[in-house]
Image (tube, rainbow, N blue to C red):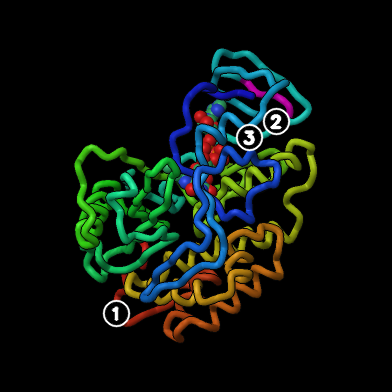
């Protein structure tokens, strides 16, 4: 295992749907579970699907790498069987797997977020929120949209995060910070100014499925949501054993999910809450098929078709065009829902 900083602490807050996580995951890696999180489009939706926030430190400790030789260096060059390190040393193995993540590029949409960690006692009346698209964050109605994410971290702490789901370019941290401050004030939550900050920025596209890549680099990220942690944990053993983790169905699902991202980027800002109303009105099984069923082509197609037929007709035209990769003409210039230049 080659890692430039093998002892570096992981600091991101990772979460996943409980049913996505592998059975072998140590229970200690779970910091908190939300049995039925809320989502808001223009109205409230209770999601009947437990959501898990991981304890990043304990997750890291629980992942057993006994038996591996850990080399603290950077990989400069990879071939199918060799890794050249920055000091010129060459390591060889039966198979090299590239898990170097995705390098940022203007070509890839990114997800950004600005979060604050507060004591639960200061968030009275605020339920855990998978996403809340309500317009109380001070942004103009036609500005690229962001949503509030609110989850317990365990130990009496709550993470409140203003998130730009995807943008090319995405909203920057300062804009998200201002929106979060505005939103929390609107909801009567006072800030002391010394809260721990979590900053998020990562590409949601750019993964390349294949035998020699894994993690976000290997296409395990969901382009329309940015989630990859549960999918990577679930597939890790099969990848290590050299099994096929990209059957034709998974490759087709990967392409459909990318089409889903194009659709999100093409929607005007005012349409997004209605779009998510339609999404969260679907039964949990259909939501799960689209969000989590990496190899279930039938389920993904059914969920996308179902969502499509539930959308208002104006949105349907735009979503269809974006999904097929076509530009939909409009007499008025409609800025993208999230952000695409
Ligand atoms: C703050 C934050 C919160 C997130 N929250 C969630 C969440 O709740 N749920 C979810 O599913 N996803 C979440 N994501 C998105 C995504 O799942 C993560 O980005 C995840 O870390 C991707 O994992 P990865 O191991 O594939 O890539 P990375 O985490 O990017 O890891 C790549 C690793 O490769 C190393 N590396 C890079 N170059 C080299 C080199 N040349 N040689 C050797 N090593 C190298 C890096 O040091 C790094 O350790 C979040 C992302 C961020 C940034």
* Of the pair 158 and 9, the residue shown nearer to us: 158
Q: Residues within 10 Å of mark 1 (few under 14, many from 20)?
A: few
Instruction: Give the residues drawn in magenta, as a range.
Output: 79-84
62 sits left or right of 107 in the view: right
* Of the pair 47 and 275, the residue shown nearer to us: 47
140 sits left or right of 62 in the view: left
Q: Is mark 2 within 8 Å of ligand 1?
A: no
Which of labels 1 and 2 is toward the front?
2
Whether residue 167 is visible: no
Q: Residue at x 33, y 54 (%)?
A: 162
Task: Specify whether residue 81 is painted magenta.
Answer: yes
Seen in the picture, residue 154 relative to 134 is either above or below; the reply is above
**What residue would you read off at disc 1?**
332
Residue 257's spot in the image, x, y percent?
Answer: 58, 62
**What residue would you read off at disc 2?**
96
Residue with the most extreme bottom position: 313
Q: Mark 3: which secondary structure?
A: loop
Quadrant showing the C terminus? bottom left
**What residue would you read off at disc 3?**
98
Residue 174's spot in the image, x, y percent?
Answer: 24, 47
Q: CA distance from mark 3 to mark 2?
A: 7 Å
Q: Are marks 3 and 2 in contact (CB under 8 Å)?
A: yes
Q: Residue at x 41, y 58 (%)?
A: 128
The number of numbered badges drawn on the structure is 3
Q: Mark 1: which secondary structure?
A: loop
Residue 328's spot in the image, x, y percent?
Answer: 43, 77
Quadrant showing the N terminus? top right
Whichever of callouts 1 and 3 sits on the residue coming sooner in the sequence is: 3
Q: CA distance from mark 1 to mark 3?
A: 45 Å
Task: Specify whether residue 274 is painted magenta.
Answer: no
């Amino acid at each position: 295992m080659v890692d430039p900083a093998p002892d570096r602490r992981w600091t991101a807050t990772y979460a996943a749907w409980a049913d996505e996580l592998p059975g072998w995951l140590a229970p200690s890696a779970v910091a908190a579970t939300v049995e039925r999180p809320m989502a808001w489009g223009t109205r409230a939706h209770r999601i009947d699907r437990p959501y898990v926030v991981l304890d990043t430190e304990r997750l890291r400790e629980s992942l057993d790498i006994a038996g591996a030789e850990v080399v603290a260096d950077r990989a400069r060059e990879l071939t199918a069987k060799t890794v050249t390190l920055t000091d010129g040393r060459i390591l060889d193995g039966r198979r090299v797997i590239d898990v170097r993540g995705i390098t940022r590029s203007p070509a890839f949409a990114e997800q950004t977020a600005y979060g604050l960690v507060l004591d639960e006692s200061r968030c009275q009346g605020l339920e855990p929120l998978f996403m809340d698209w309500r317009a109380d964050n001070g942004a103009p109605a036609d500005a690229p949209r962001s949503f509030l994410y609110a989850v317990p971290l365990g130990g009496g702490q709550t993470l409140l995060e203003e998130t730009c789901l995807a943008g090319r370019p995405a909203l920057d941290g300062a804009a998200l910070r201002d929106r979060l401050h505005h939103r929390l004030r609107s909801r009567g939550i006072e800030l002391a100014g010394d809260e721990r900050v979590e900053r998020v920025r990562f590409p949601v596209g750019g993964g390349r499925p294949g035998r020699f890549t894994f993690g976000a680099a290997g296409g395990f990220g969901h382009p329309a949501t940015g989630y990859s942690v549960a999918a990577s944990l679930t597939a890790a053993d099969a990848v290590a054993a050299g099994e096929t983790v990209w059957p034709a169905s998974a490759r087709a699902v990967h392409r459909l999910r990318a089409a889903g991202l194009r659709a999100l980027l093409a929607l005007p800002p005012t349409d997004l809450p209605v779009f998510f109303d339609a999404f969260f009105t679907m039964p949990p099984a259909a939501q799960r098929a689209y969000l989590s069923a990496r190899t279930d082509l039938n389920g993904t197609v059914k969920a996308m078709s179902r969502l499509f037929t539930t959308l208002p007709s104006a949105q349907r035209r735009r979503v269809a065009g974006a999904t097929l990769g076509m530009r939909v003409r409009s007499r008025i210039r409609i800025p993208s829902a999230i952000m695409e230049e």
